[in-house]
Image (cartoon, helix red, strand yellow):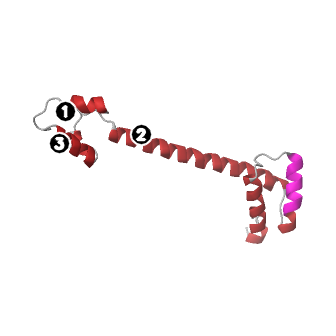
Amino acid sequence: MSPAASSRWCPTPEQLMILEEMYRGGVRTPNASQIQQITAHLSFYGKIEGKNVFYWFQNHKARDRQKLRRKLSKQLQQQQQFHQHHHQPLQQQNQRNQPLLHYLDPPVYSAFHQLFNYNTSPFLPQVILILI
């Protein structure tokens, strides 16, 4: 099928700008009357049908929800990773068999190391658990 005979709607930059402004202004699901008015207005800037307006809003809203879900999912993963990294039980060991105390932030580790001789104090894990 040649590009001229294509049945797919290609919005003009002006049409897209107007649709985006309307969406940002709060129009999410225009009714039939609003679709007719929008279509009439946008027809000054290029070929367009009511179904194009209807589907544009439907698709734009769906993409916004999808972006929001991805963003929230990413934030949740980051929070879980942070929680796992910073709030693990101290009795656990990492893969190299190093005590997790070594993975505390340097100022925190240094303060505990100065207060207690980590290598000889049996009380350090209990103290850290209480502080966490």
Q: State the CA–CA distance, disc 3 to disc 2.
A: 31 Å
Residue visible at 27% across and 30% down in the picture: 129
The residue type indicated by label 2 comes to Gln
- Amino acid under label 1? Leu
Residue 118's image quarter? Answer: top left
Residue 7 visible, this angle: no
Residue 43 in sight from this viewpoint: yes
- State which quarter of the image contains the C terminus: top left
Asked whether, in this view, residue 82 is left or right of residue 14, the answer is: left
Tell me, for residue 124, which label it has, or none: 1
> In the image, which disc is placed on residue 115?
none
In the image, which disc is placed on residue 80? 2
Based on the picture, tell me whether residue 41 belongs to the magenta stretch.
yes
Q: Which residues are magenta?
A: 32-42
Where residue 125 appears, as percent x and y from the top left, is 21, 31
Between disc 1 and disc 2, the foreground one is 1
Q: Tell me what residue is drawn at x 75 percent, y 63 percent.
A: 17
Q: Earlier in the sequence, mark 3 or mark 2?
A: 2
